[in-house]
């Protein structure tokens, strides 16, 4: 048979099949348009469409072109739906590359709405997806919140991830589960550069699937962050939707933004495909913080089934130390440093359970030092082995103390704050309004937050004096500080850094809104229960045309204390003196007492008393403010 005749015959036989497929695709597209599926919330969530902020229309927040089947699918939900339906009839070079395999969640939803005829639309065998789904073997989804870690700009708000619990796992084997997380795809180690690039979407955000034990080690052991696990009350069909959509997102990427399109936001975007009525991301039009995303779940009735607290190794260590007597603390430290032998008579003279607690604490402390890379212990491996042998010889059960969980992250105050008040400066009355979009300061109630940490962004205050117009008193885009107490075991540095604009006197008598930055580094110590004292070396720079030479630069010191007479009442007192050595000599000095009294979880009163001297101008001020957290 001539070759040409063979191809003509094959084409004649196959063309009716293609025509039939094309007819059925047209039929499905027509029915989808009649049902207006492209306007449905389910489709909008599957392709991550949101309304344009200014211009009419919508756009998808997914930024990888491969996620769309239509050329204009990023901006056109209907075109993307039509192209998706037609792509299900296409041939593929490899079965797992077929659109039905790349988009199982889209296929499942469209099939449920349109009722695909299996005789007219072949269901593709997606081997890789089947194997991935079988390996995960999900029976439950759990949102995990890792507490804030102020020493890493990428984690200063905390972090969330989704754990996929298998049917055969329990609390003892939960670490073997898989996790789904979203993060910036970068190896950047410079925290400040990471934060700056994250502000402007310079990174690609990607979903990843990793074993849970790796994440627990990363968050709990290396960064000393407590974990909170929120088991979601989803049925099997809802879990299947979430996992199918996670498969669709694994090859995709989003432009990562530090404040809005971050881990918290996009995990909510993944979870809300579980139920048509779930609208989780729409309540975060400007910024989405991890703790707010957790609150969005717990405040929705019937979505969270169970909550589990997992204290970090640092929290457990702190509890161990709190339960030891002073002499026992010294023995535990010396055991870890190798200056006390496990066979020392003083240790052997302790009751068995007390001796066990001392040895376990010493071993944990040694492990922490080795993990942190401390090299001042001559032979850490030999000391660790000796401590394990000594512990084995003590006839007592394990002494790991129970840790009370305290307030959950979702039970703390809300992260945005509005303040309104009045006061007086040098006998001139004023009214003031302040807005802090995020997140927490040293005076705020620590319930649900990391104590001793302050993270504030874009804090603005406007003030009007009697007879004057309203003016901006300060605008501080960035203010972060950490006051972690030092002791014989740990010696963290306390530090603070802030940058922005604030009113500053000059020698000419002007009070411009000067740009500047300030910061300090030092130490903090617990003087007694609920009393923290700190000292730091400080530096400050201000720039404005009203200054001589246009700027002032100085250095000095700060001494302060934070006292909490009660959980609802906190007092912060400090004195600071800066000596100017370049530019205009302003030599600013300040003595401050500020207090916060909590009236309800999201309502507080604040009293500020100040005495300041700037460029030869001395003045006092007092202000009382009502703070509303929202």
Image (cartoon, rainbow, N blue to C red):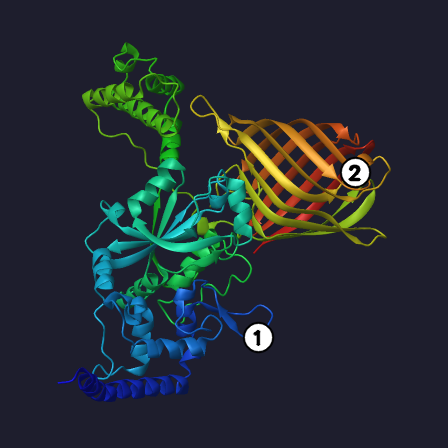
Q: Quadrant of residue 441?
A: top right
- Residue 47 seen from this side: yes
Q: What SS does tag 2 mark?
A: helix
Q: What SS does tag 1 mark?
A: loop
Which residue carries the number 2 mark?
Answer: 550
Residue 111 numbered tag: none
506 to 471, vertically: above or below: above
37 to 531, vertically: above or below: below
The quadrant the C terminus occupies is bottom right
The quadrant the N terminus occupies is bottom left
Instruction: Please state the horizontal and vertical placement of residue 102, each as a whole percent of the image.
Output: 31, 67
Label 2 crowding class (10 Å Cα cut-off): few <14, some 14-19, many 20+?
Answer: few
> Between residues 400 and 268, which one lies in front from this camera angle?
268
Q: Quadrant of residue 325?
A: top left
Given contact means CB atoms under 8 Å apart, are the residues at marks 1 and 2 in contact?
A: no
> Between residues 475 and 484, which one lies in front from this camera angle?
475
Residue 56 numbered tag: 1
Most extreme residue toward the top, as rendered? 345
Q: Residue at x 32, y 69 (%)?
A: 105
Q: Counting residues from the N terminus, which is met first, the one under dot 1 or under dot 2?
A: 1
Q: Residue at x 51, y 57 (%)?
A: 260
Q: CA distance from mark 1 to mark 2?
A: 46 Å
Question: In screen coordinates, is 58 left or right of 513?
Answer: left
Most extreme residue toward the front, as rendered? 2
Instruction: Please state the horizontal and vertical placement of residue 254, each as a whole percent of the image.
Output: 45, 59
> Between residues 569 and 609, which one lies in front from this camera angle?
609
Label 1 crowding class (10 Å Cα cut-off): few <14, some 14-19, many 20+?
Answer: few
């Amino acid at each position: 048979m001539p070759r040409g005749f063979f191809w003509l015959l094959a084409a004649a036989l196959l063309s009716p099949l293609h025509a039939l497929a094309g007819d059925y695709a047209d039929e499905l597209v027509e029915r989808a348009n009649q049902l207006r599926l492209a306007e449905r919330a389910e489709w909008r969530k599957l392709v991550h469409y949101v309304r344009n902020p200014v211009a009419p229309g919508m756009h998808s927040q997914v930024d990888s072109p491969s996620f769309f089947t239509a050329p204009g699918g990023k901006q056109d939900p209907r075109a993307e739906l039509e192209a998706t339906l037609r792509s299900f009839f296409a041939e593929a070079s490899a079965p797992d590359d077929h659109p039905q395999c790349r988009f199982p969640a889209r296929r499942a939803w469209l099939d449920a709405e349109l009722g695909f005829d299996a005789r007219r639309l072949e269901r593709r065998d997606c081997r890789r997806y089947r194997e991935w789904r079988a390996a995960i073997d999900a029976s439950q989804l759990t949102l995990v919140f890792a507490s804030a870690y102020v020493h890493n700009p990428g984690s200063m708000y905390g972090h969330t991830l989704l754990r996929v619990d298998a049917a055969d796992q329990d609390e003892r084997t939960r670490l073997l589960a898989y996790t789904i997380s979203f993060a910036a795809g970068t190896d950047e180690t410079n925290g400040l550069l990471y934060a700056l690039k994250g502000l402007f979407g310079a990174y690609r955000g990607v979903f990843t699937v990793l074993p849970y034990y790796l994440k627990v080690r990363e968050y709990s052991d290396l960064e000393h962050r407590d974990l909170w696990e929120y088991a979601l009350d989803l049925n099997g069909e809802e879990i299947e939707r979430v996992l199918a959509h996670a498969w669709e997102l694994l090859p995709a990427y989003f432009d990562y933004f530090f404040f809005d399109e971050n881990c918290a936001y996009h995990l909510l975007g993944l979870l809300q495909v579980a139920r048509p009525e779930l609208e989780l991301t729409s309540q975060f039009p400007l910024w989405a913080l991890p703790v707010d995303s957790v609150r969005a779940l717990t405040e929705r009735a019937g979505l969270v089934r169970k909550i589990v607290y997992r204290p970090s190794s640092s929290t457990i260590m702190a509890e161990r130390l709190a339960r030891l007597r002073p002499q026992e603390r010294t023995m535990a430290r010396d055991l870890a440093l190798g200056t006390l032998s496990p066979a020392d008579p003083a240790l052997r003279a302790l009751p068995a359970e007390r001796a066990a607690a001392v040895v376990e604490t010493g071993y944990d402390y040694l492990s922490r030092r080795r993990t942190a890379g401390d090299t001042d212990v001559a032979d850490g491996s030999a000391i660790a082995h000796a401590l394990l042998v000594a512990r084995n010889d003590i006839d007592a059960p394990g002494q790991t103390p129970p840790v009370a969980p305290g307030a959950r992250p979702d039970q703390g105050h809300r992260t945005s704050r509005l303040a309104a008040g009045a006061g007086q400066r040098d006998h001139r009355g004023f009214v003031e309004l302040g807005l802090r979009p995020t997140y927490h300061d040293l005076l705020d109630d620590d319930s649900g937050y990391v104590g001793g940490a302050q993270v504030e962004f874009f804090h603005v205050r406007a003030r009007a004096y009697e007879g004057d117009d309203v003016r901006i008193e300060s605008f501080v885009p960035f203010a972060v500080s950490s006051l972690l107490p030092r002791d014989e075991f740990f010696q963290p540095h306390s530090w603070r850094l802030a940058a922005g604009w604030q009113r500053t006197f000059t020698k000419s008598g002007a009070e411009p809104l000067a740009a500047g930055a300030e910061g300090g580094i030092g130490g903090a110590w617990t003087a007694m229960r609920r009393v923290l004292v700190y000292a730091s070396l400080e530096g400050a720079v201000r720039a404005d045309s009203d200054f001589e030479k246009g700027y002032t630069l100085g250095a000095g010191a700060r001494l302060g204390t934070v006292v909490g007479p009660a959980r609802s009442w906190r007092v912060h007192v400090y004195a600071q003196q800066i000596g100017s050595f370049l530019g205009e000599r302003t030599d600013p000095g300040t003595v401050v007492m500020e207090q916060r009294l909590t009236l309800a979880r999201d309502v507080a009163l604040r009293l500020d008393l100040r005495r300041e001297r700037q460029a030869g101008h001395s003045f006092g001020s007092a202000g009382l403010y009502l703070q509303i957290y929202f």
